[in-house]
Image (cartoon, grey):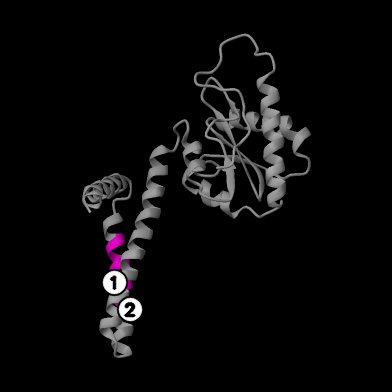
Amino acid sequence: MARETSENPGRLKQIRLAYTMTKKVDTKIGLIIAGVGLLTFGVFLAIGFAIDHPVYLGILGFIVAVLAMAIVFGRRAERAAFGQMEGQPGAVAAVLNNIRRGWSSSSTPVAVTRNQDAVYRAVGRAGIALIGEGNPNRVRQLLASEKKKMARVVGDVPVHDIVVGNGEGEIPLKKLQIHLMRLPRAITAAQVTETNDRLRALGDLLSKAPIPKGPMPKGARMPKGGQAR
């Protein structure tokens, strides 16, 4: 019992912090959440009066309203967080780490430049997604290089080139997760595992290759294959 009491203040503090951070970006978040709650509760209550069960439907409506408010708040808070990260190095990794199912990836980029342009790789039923962040022109060169590097080991597995940004043909960071989840399935679960194994073997092979002389980009690592989480 004492443990539950000690944990509740921590959860409430996290919720308040999340709300405060979200409101800085999404100034209407409070009105939107309240509106969702009141509308949901009102609809259930109206149905309750219509069928002569206002108490039962009122209680049910309150529960559903709280759930709807939590869902809306969670999604808008997530979008606000991604909006604050947009344009920062490592933002794509944060999005990939937030995907709970359907894709396996690594928080380490498979290609990076001294200017902190980076390409991340994810493997799922849609195939392989190569996701670049940074200067669009340099990123497209990185994507082409990485795609060429993988060509001899991935066979006919589809490869999706994605440039994160707000320009033409680019995907905004806040829409990246939705974009990945909506890509059509093209390979089986067994092929996902096989593709991951091949890419991991390619990464191991490259990591054993001689390292070229000259300065390495800050924070750069040798490419590694994506690992399923």
162 left or right of 50 in image: right
Depth-wise, is mark 2 or mark 1 nearer the camera? 1
Q: Where residue 184 appears, x then y in whole percent?
A: 65, 55
203 left or right of 22 in image: right
4 left or right of 203 in image: left
The residue lying at 29 percent from left, 66 percent from top is: 35
Q: Where residue 49 appears, x then y in whole percent?
A: 28, 87
The stretch in magenta equals 32-44
In the picture as drawn, the residue positioned furthest to the top comes out as 213
> What residue is disc 1 on?
62
- Which of marks 1 and 2 precedes in the sequence? 2
User: Looking at the picture, does residue 196 appear above or below residue 110?
Assistant: below
Q: Quadrant of the C terminus?
A: top right
Q: Secondary structure at mark 2?
A: helix
- Queried whether the magenta region covers residue 43, the answer comes back as yes
Report the magenta stretch's main SS: helix
Residue 44 - label: 2
The residue lying at 65 percent from left, 12 percent from top is: 212
